[in-house]
Image (cartoon, coloured by chain):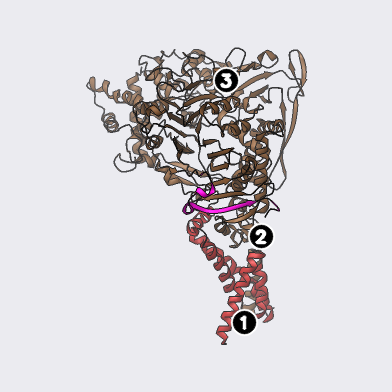
Chain colours: A brown, B red
Amino acid sequence: MLHPASMRRFRLVIALVLLLALGFVGARPLGPLPALGDFLDPANGAWALLRASRLPSSISRLPGLSAPVELLLDDRGVPHIFASTEVDAYRALGWIVARDRLFQLELTSRATAGTLAELLGARLLEADRATRALGLAHAADRKFARLDSTSPGRRAIMAYADGVNAWIEGMGPADLPVEYRLLGKRPRRWRPEYTMYLFANMGLTLAGEDPAQPRLAVQSLVGQAAAEALVPLNSPVQEPIQPNGGAAPRFALAPLPPPGAPDSEATLALSLRRDLARGSSAERDEDGAGVLGSNNWAVAPSRTRDGQALLAGDPHLRLTLPSIWYEAHLVVPGRLDVAGVTLPGSPGVTIGFNREVAWTFTNTGSDVLDLYRETVDHPTSPTRYRLDGAWRPLGLSVETYHDPAGRVLAVDTIRFTHRGPMRQAQGHWLSMRWTVLEVSREIDVFGRAVAASSAEDWLDAMREYLVPTQNGLVADRRGTIAVRSSGWYPLRPGGRGDLIFDGSTSASDWTGRLPVEQYPFSIRPTQGFLASANQQPVDPQDNPAYLGADWPSPWRAIRINTLLRGEPRMTPDGMRRMHTDPESARAQAFLPFFQSAGGIPQAAGQSDPKLDRALSLLAQWDGSYRPDNERAILFELAMRELPTRLWDELIPPDSSEPSGRPVYSTSQSLYLALADPGSVWWDDRRTADTLETRHDILAQSLKAAFDTALARYGEPDGGGWAWAKVWPTNIWHLLRLPSLSATGLAVQGGPETIAPAGRNGEHGASWRMVVELGTPVRAWGTYPGGQSGNPASLLYTNRIQQWVRGELDSLLFPRSAAELPDRRVRSRVRLMPAGGK
Amino acid sequence: MTQRSRRTLWLGLSAVAMAAGTFWIGWWSVPVLALFMGLRCRSGDAAIAALLAWTGLLVWNATTGPILPYADRLGGIFGLPGWGMLLATPLFAALLGWSAATLPHSLRHGGT
């Protein structure tokens, strides 16, 4: 037993140590932990975000306004902004977006600027270097500087930035987003240029494709002839956006030439392109297939139940929390009345509708990136490059990278020719010309398009649209529907852009742009509907102009068109149901081949119990990808096994590809082979003593798929094969914090369905919208997430389950503040000019 | 007024002071106020006052938003269950209050 005095001393020591320890962890971050005092503080720390999640009805000052602005938040968290001028509306939009999405704004702008390491740490250094080497931020700065100071776009950007900064300056301690609290950072001021960074970032996502890489990857292993056939310029299955007059897909299936000898030139060209375009490649899944699969379609009044045009759209992108989109409604009497989704950081509605017109986009995915082999004056530190026999100075930019503490992590010098950024790859210097880096004025174009009064008016505004190329679909209240694949299609010497050009001569440079009149286009089609799903936009028999290569498979477009052809009295709800349609044209095309795989052994009197069982299970599949379906996974695993057996020639001998996968395989190339049962490609050259046939490879693939399914998911009827369990969708928080993410979502749809689901489950319909162009215009929509980026808010994930179920909200579209029902109003904020009453 | 009533009143006032201090000044007002409390009362009282202050603030937050799902999200960041996060917050304040109040209390009662 301790003496009382000793006890007191002991208590004193314990208290002192504890106080110092708590004071330390309270005031300073420790490893990944934030400073706990500030974080746990229930008055102003992370808990306070519960209070910040509500925007009480109030009067707030917003400097720069020319007149008061009414901002009403509806019960879905959507701001309805009623302003006297467009500039005031955009100022208010910047203010409310900053309130809801402040961290997202900063992260997106930093991703483009290549300054993520300053916020998130040195582990992002290589990503920053790759980004800066593309010159995105330089190009965005240049674009902003070229905007006329009186242009509506520039004024909108400036006003939006003022709104964002007014929020930052006026926000209280409780409003600081949780991400900043975790990182121990404060938000930085929003520069107007960051809006252009956002566009550049979108360009990187949507126009970063280098169509030459797949072909070169194949060519390096099996020669040019086979590569040209396997990665053709034109889709072998034609279901184009611009209707070609056919009532069914046109199959242009030619026999595949046999594999040729490896091509070492192609190997070099491939590695050059990979090095140079590092950081710019579009998003692909583990099999190399594109994962961004957007759709849109419109139906003319002649084919709708109520005699009004209908339009639907669902752009597919990487899904994040918060969402890439933010819903808003802007009203300026007599000037603007538009609702839809905006990109946080951008003033204006990107996809939406006004009182007359609705519009939406899918990505065209054309070839807009070219490479040039340059001649320089020094092998490692050039300052000049040769053009038309003369030396020209290189543009130089010294890039310094910092960590969160401000310490210098690295310093790079980025060089520029007149074409764009130049990089060294394997001893060669190559420059890049890319439309994303060119001066363009999308902000002004969108500003005009949102105020269009007819489909023709909208198309006219979009004539100036350049980057990234988009399949813009529009419908109006007069019943016009139209689609045009708009954007900058470079004209090159020789036509094709999937080669490396000689940089020493200006004769290699782009000679212009494809004129608007030659864009893929259709208006008021006789078929009464239009659709796009990233497929080749025009049938080469109608227009042979080179727009790109390696086009996505058209299975989604085939399914959409099949549904539209089959419904002469379409309704808004029918359009909604199509968004999550579980059927697959791809499955319908491939399933018969697998089902025929049992034919040969049985005919020969051989019995293969495993194959028989797999076939029996496959026969039970209805070809749909409903969440509870327990057979789709067998088909998908077989589709994954097939390329590794069929394309053995495309597996590099020193395979750096994961798990010995071929360097290239798409469902279109598989279909080409399946349509040619006598092709030599069916023989697996790894089995020297056996000559495999199409049946053998299909049977092997199916049996291997069955083995895999049993090993991974148990017995077929044990519940483990349910589609939703084996192929879930995951929506990750921007910092990939699991508890702030929504993962394991049971969505309906699979590969190449209208709601395509990539293997990583991280992509999907980022916004779904249906608009009926009647009187009045009615619209429905949702996206997976919620309006608020604050995880303490009810509006953080409130739309996810609705999105999973394929349901849509009716979108409020009041003409005035008074027209919005009180019961639907969450808060009313009157934004007053500074100094106003 | 009984001693018990006086103590309750004192605890209540101290808790209000700590809540106000947290709101207006910051989390570190809890140990500062506890240091002063340690001159007059038991260190356990300072801990209880801090616990009450931060629990009260948590309850205030809970009236404005969905605290349980949010606690799950916050706790998940640190590998804690939501209730662990809810518990850790007032506990942090209580430990701050106790340790800070113990110093003057022990010194005053001949702790060295």
In reply to whether residue A171 is colored magenta, the answer given is no
User: Residue A4 shows which numbered tag?
Assistant: 1
Is residue A178 positioned above or below A340 on the image?
A: below
* Residue A64 point in image, percent of width and height: 69, 46
Residue that numbered label 3 is attached to = A516
> Residue farthest to the bottom?
B1
Residue toward you, B70 or A452: A452
Between the residue at mark 3 and the residue at mark 1, the CA separation in whole angstroms equals 93 Å
Indicate the amino acid at tag 1: Pro
Q: Quadrant of residue A111?
A: top right
Q: Report x, y in % for residue A724.
A: 38, 41
**What type is the residue that disc 3 sits on?**
Val
Outermost residue on the left side: it is A605
Q: Earlier in the sequence, mark 1 or mark 2?
A: 1
Question: Do discs 3 and 1 belong to a common subunit?
Answer: yes
* Magenta span: A814-837
The quarter of the rendered structure image containing the N terminus of chain A is bottom right
Question: Element type at marker 2?
Answer: helix
Give the percent coordinates (x, y) of residue A795.
Answer: 50, 50
Q: Which residue is mark 2?
A: A27
